Image: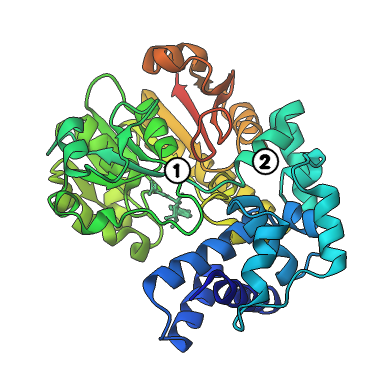
């Protein structure tokens, strides 16, 4: 398929996403099933146009003066694929599978806006109701941060030091553009792809099968590193999910200490067994039964709660979720976070630490949760986060936003997904 046919397919898929309010991955999969002639290169390119259009929904609509699926898809090509009005039109005019060539109105809108920086509300590319939330988090930088969360993401890997080392993994990934990450000590980054490009399928690499590395955003690696105590000890990862943070801690402990991995949903936890095996992690025990949890009360040196959240820090990877998120969902997540925080205090032993992590960029889910928690639980005291950041990441002083209540990572400042980290000690 030429770019015109791919553009037409992307417009059709965006229409499906808009009208049926469905996740982009579902709409792309269904399109693929009903267009089996399309090769993997076509699917990747169409997927890139769809995701770029969703990442840049407001700026693409502004650029074309048109918020329809056509306007968004054309905007995606102009903003991310290196086309201008003439080169794009040249692709469309003599391609019978392409949508119609640019109209006079579209050309006029592009002529007025192309190459110019829109106002912060457009540039941030977030739903209108989220604008005040970003302003609260980032102050004058909110447009810049929002824009950074609208870019394509890199592919980040974490070297599993139980089985490998950075140079071995870099050698195994030679030719993929992999290089050492800037902040996380065991991180490897493959930069974002351009145009119709796609990241290598690293999970098909023998090194992945042998457990040499995991796929994990650098921000996730950094918060796991911040949570890692100086000595291996007793840890409860209470919202372990598929075990991203559990695996990081297990490797950092060099298979010493004891990590209990729990999740309210057994199905979310189930991939952890294969992952632990592949990683060679032997200091992790998955627990789901209540009596086993009860036995941990007042026993844990560290309780980690990587709580359910809006996921607003992951918008680079899941741009469709950005437009589906509602204020009501934010409220529900906040209430779950409060309940989990209050519940897990029982597992922290006196002198132990409670770590709270979100992949959200909203203060409502982050600093404000912590302020309220510390008021409800005066026996907990926030760690000195400035000292912790300086100790763990002396080479990255300016790459996080640190205050009394925690450490924030962001796309523009840290070059990672958005994360919030807070550690509190129980007196
Ligand atoms: C952000 S995800 C965890 C991601 C995981 N820690 C990782 O690094 O891959 C949040 C997890 O919390 C779990 N969860 C939600 N409510 C919970 C509760 N009340 N108790 C325990 N886990 C809960 C969800 O099932 C989900 O797997």
Identify which residue is drawn at 87% across, 58% down: 108
Among all residues in the image, which is located at the extreme bottom? 34
Position of 295 compared to 424: left or right? left
- Residue 352 locus on image (x, y percent): 37, 24
Q: Dot 2: what SS? A: helix
Say whether residue 73 is visible. Answer: no
Classify 284 as above or below 186: below
Give the label, 2 or 1, closer to the camera. Answer: 2
Classify 271 as above or below 113: below
- Residue 192 locus on image (x, y percent): 45, 45
- Residue 24 locus on image (x, y percent): 55, 69
Identify which residue is drawn at 57% across, 63% down: 49
Question: Looking at this view, is 296 or 4 the one in front?
Answer: 4
Q: Quadrant of the rendered structure where residue 133 is? A: top right
Q: Dot 1: what SS? A: strand
Measure the alpha-carbon separation of dots 2 and 1. 23 Å
Q: Quadrant of the rendered structure where residue 103 is? A: bottom right
Say whether residue 205 is visible. Answer: yes
- Numbered tag placed on residue 306 in the rendering: 1
- Residue 32 locus on image (x, y percent): 45, 80
- Numbered tag placed on residue 146 in the rendering: 2
Position of 121 compared to 329: left or right? right
Which quarter of the figure is the C terminus placed in? Answer: top left
Question: Looking at this view, is 42 or 26 the one in front?
Answer: 42
Ligand 1 under 8 Å from disc 1 Cβ: yes
Mark 1 neighbour density, 10 Å: few (under 14) some (14–19) many (20 or more): many
Q: Quadrant of the rendered structure where residue 171 is? A: top left
């Amino acid at each position: 398929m030429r770019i015109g046919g791919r553009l037409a397919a992307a417009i059709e898929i965006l229409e499906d996403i808009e009208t049926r309010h469905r996740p982009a991955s579902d709409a792309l999969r269904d399109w693929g099933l009903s267009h089996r002639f399309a090769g993997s290169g076509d699917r990747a390119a169409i997927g890139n146009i769809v995701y770029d259009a969703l990442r840049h929904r407001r700026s693409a609509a502004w650029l074309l003066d048109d918020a329809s699926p056509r306007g968004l898809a054309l905007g995606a090509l102009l903003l991310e694929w290196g086309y201008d009005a003439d080169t794009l039109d040249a692709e469309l005019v003599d391609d019978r599978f392409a949508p119609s060539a640019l109209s006079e109105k579209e050309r006029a809108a592009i002529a007025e806006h192309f190459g110019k920086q829109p106002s912060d509300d457009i540039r941030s590319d977030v739903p209108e109701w989220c604008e005040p939330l970003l302003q609260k988090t980032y102050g004058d930088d909110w447009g810049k941060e929002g824009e950074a969360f609208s870019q394509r993401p890199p592919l980040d890997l974490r070297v599993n030091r139980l089985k490998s080392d950075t140079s071995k993994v870099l050698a195994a990934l030679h030719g993929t553009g992999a290089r050492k990450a800037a902040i996380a000590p065991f991180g490897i980054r493959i930069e974002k792809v351009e145009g119709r490009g796609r990241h290598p399928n690293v999970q098909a690499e023998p090194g992945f099968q042998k457990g040499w590395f995991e796929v994990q955003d650098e921000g996730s690696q950094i918060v796991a590193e911040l949570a890692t105590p100086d000595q291996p000890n007793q840890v409860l990862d209470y919202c372990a999910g598929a075990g991203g943070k559990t695996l990081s801690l297990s490797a950092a402990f060099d298979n010493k200490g004891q990590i209990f991995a729990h999740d309210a949903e057994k199905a979310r936890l189930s991939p952890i067994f294969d992952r632990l095996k592949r990683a060679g992690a032997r200091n992790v025990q998955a627990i789901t039964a209540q009596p086993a949890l009860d036995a941990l009360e007042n026993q844990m040196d560290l309780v980690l709660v990587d709580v359910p959240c809006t996921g607003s820090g992951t918008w680079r990877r899941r741009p469709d979720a950005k437009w589906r998120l509602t204020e009501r969902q934010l409220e529900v997540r906040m209430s779950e976070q409060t309940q989990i925080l209050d519940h897990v205090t029982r597992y922290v032993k006196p002198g132990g630490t409670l770590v709270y992590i979100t992949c959200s960029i909203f203060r409502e889910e982050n600093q404000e949760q912590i302020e309220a928690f510390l008021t409800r639980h005066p026996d907990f005291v926030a760690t000195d986060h400035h000292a912790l950041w300086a100790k763990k990441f002396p080479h990255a002083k300016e790459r996080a936003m640190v205050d009394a209540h925690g450490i924030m990572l962001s796309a523009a400042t840290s070059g990672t997904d958005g994360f919030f980290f807070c550690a509190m000690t129980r007196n």
